[in-house]
Amino acid sequence: MNAKKYRQVRAVVAIFVGAIVSIAATRDSYLLSAAGVLTGMIFLILVRSKARIIVDEREKTIREKAANMTYAIFAPTIGIGAFLLMIPYRDISPVFAKGEFAYLESLGMVFAYLTLFLITIYAISYWFLNRKYGGGRDE
């Protein structure tokens, strides 16, 4: 199976899973929704194991640069969002003084923890890959 055929199969499976999830959502059947997604994932894993998709060096370089750019944009954005959501707005606006938007501070805490988790994962993976690919101790 080549890459074009695999993309076609993946599109058909995505449409099928989307239909199952939408039907399950309208009937409030979350178990059916989870089963549909899980079945689609297993099917795609099995199909991908049979497909021989060759990735060249250009594709790997593009993926690396996309991952680096995504991290460089996402980590500061979510960190700034966390900071802005944790500012005490009660003194600024009478709407916030009533406590109607009390969940914003909690959302800011969640964003802060996610930012710290993302930075920790990046640091651990960098350390691991640096050692795996022969990085020196001076770096």
Image (tube, helix red, strand yellow):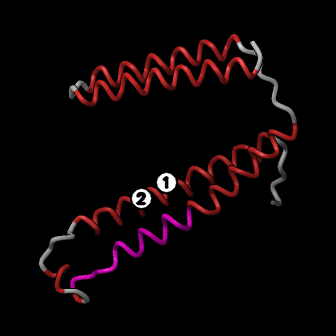
**Residue occupying the far left of the picture:** 98
Other-residue count near label 2 (Cα within 10 Å), few / some / many at <14 / 14–19 / ≥20: some
**Up-down: is 96 above or below 121?**
below
Left or right: 7, with 2 as reference point: left
Q: Quadrant of the C terminus?
A: bottom right
Residue drawn at x 22%, y 86% is: 93
Residue extent of the magenta highlight: 75-90
Q: Is residue 82 magenta?
A: yes
Which three-letter amino acid code belongs to the residue tagged 2?
Answer: Tyr
Query: What is the secondary structure assignment of the residue under circle 2?
Result: helix
Q: Is residue 5 a member of the stretch shown in magenta?
A: no
User: Which residue is drawn at the image coordinates 82% and 45% (left, top)?
Assistant: 61
User: What's the mark number on residue 113?
Assistant: 2
Residue at coordinates 63% horizontally, 13% vertically from top-left? 47
Query: Is residue 112 placed above or below 96 in the rendered structure?
Result: above
In the depicted view, which residue is nearer to us: 1 or 129? 1
Left-right relation of 70 to 52? left
Give the structural element (helix, strand or loop) at label 1.
helix
Residue receiving disc 1 = 117
Taking the spot 64% from the left edge, 21% from the top edge, the residue there is: 8
